[in-house]
Image (tube, helix red, strand yellow):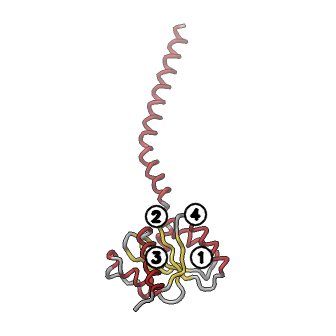
């Protein structure tokens, strides 16, 4: 029978995943407390909770998620694991962790869950290359705005040509 402490910890993980359904599992072995604290602060600014977890208890919390039935995550829950609980913009958080892993070569992204799908470490790395939500929205807005900008420029050219023609006629007759 699990202790009250373990039950409380499982509920904490489940509550975190209810608020932040996307997660990224990382290997932090070899990082000291100062480096982990600095990483937590970097992630906190993006609305991410970063926790060192107990594997068996996290597995139980993941087992309770209906959207993950049949997914193979147990193999990633061995050894020291820390989890980034992501509320939104998974690719931006993955990019932040990827940048951190470049600064600290011993830090690794192992796997992750985005939109109820389990991804291995390579796939999470690929997701880190995606543009952030803000960048994607900006690109879409500029693509939608381009025809209107071109039309406005064309109308402006026609009006300027008409004004030059009227001016030329006025100077010729005047």
Question: Is 73 located above or below residue 125 in the figure?
Answer: below
Distance (Cα) linking label 2 and label 1: 21 Å
Q: Residue at x 50, y 25 (%)?
A: 160
| Crowd rating for badge 3 (residues with CA inside 10 Å; few <14, some 14–19, many 20+) | some
The label number, if any, that marks residue 45 in the structure image: 4
**Proximity of marks 2 and 1: CB atoms separated by less than 8 Å:** no
**Looking at this view, is 46 or 118 the one in front?**
46
Question: Could you tell whether 130 is left or right of 103 in the image?
Answer: left
Residue occupied by mark 1:
101
Q: Earlier in the sequence, mark 2 or mark 1?
A: 2
Instruction: Answer whether labels 1 and 4 touch (C-beta < 8 Å).
Output: no
- Counting other residues with Cα less than 10 Å from the Cα at mark 4, is it few (<14), some (14-19), or many (20 or more)? few
Residue annotated with mark 2: 88
Frontmost of labels 1 and 4 is: 4
In front: 149, or 21?
A: 21
Q: CA distance from mark 3 to mark 1?
A: 27 Å
Q: Is 36 above or below relative to 152?
A: below
The Cα–Cα distance between marks 2 and 3, rounded to whole angstroms, is: 19 Å
- Local packing at callout 2 (Cα closer than 10 Å; few below 14, some 14-19, many 20+) is some
Labelled pair 3, 1 in contact (Cβ < 8 Å): no
């Amino acid at each position: 029978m699990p202790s009250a402490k373990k039950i409380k910890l499982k509920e904490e993980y489940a509550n975190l995943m209810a608020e932040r359904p996307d997660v990224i599992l990382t290997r932090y072995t070899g990082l000291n407390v100062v480096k982990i604290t600095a990483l937590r602060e970097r992630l906190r600014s993006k609305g991410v909770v970063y926790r060192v977890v107990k594997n068996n208890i996290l597995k139980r919390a993941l087992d309770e998620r209906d959207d993950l039935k049949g997914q193979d995550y147990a193999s990633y829950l061995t050894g020291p694991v820390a989890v980034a609980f992501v509320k939104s913009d998974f690719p931006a958080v993955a990019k932040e962790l990827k940048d951190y892993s470049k600064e600290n070569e011993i830090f690794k992204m192992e796997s992750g869950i985005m939109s109820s799908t389990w991804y291995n470490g390579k796939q999470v790395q690929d997701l880190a290359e995606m543009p952030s939500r803000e960048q994607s929205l900006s690109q879409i807005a500029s693509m939608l705005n381009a025809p209107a900008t071109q039309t406005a420029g064309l109308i402006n050219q026609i009006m300027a040509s008409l004004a030059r023609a009227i001016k030329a006629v006025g100077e010729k007759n005047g």
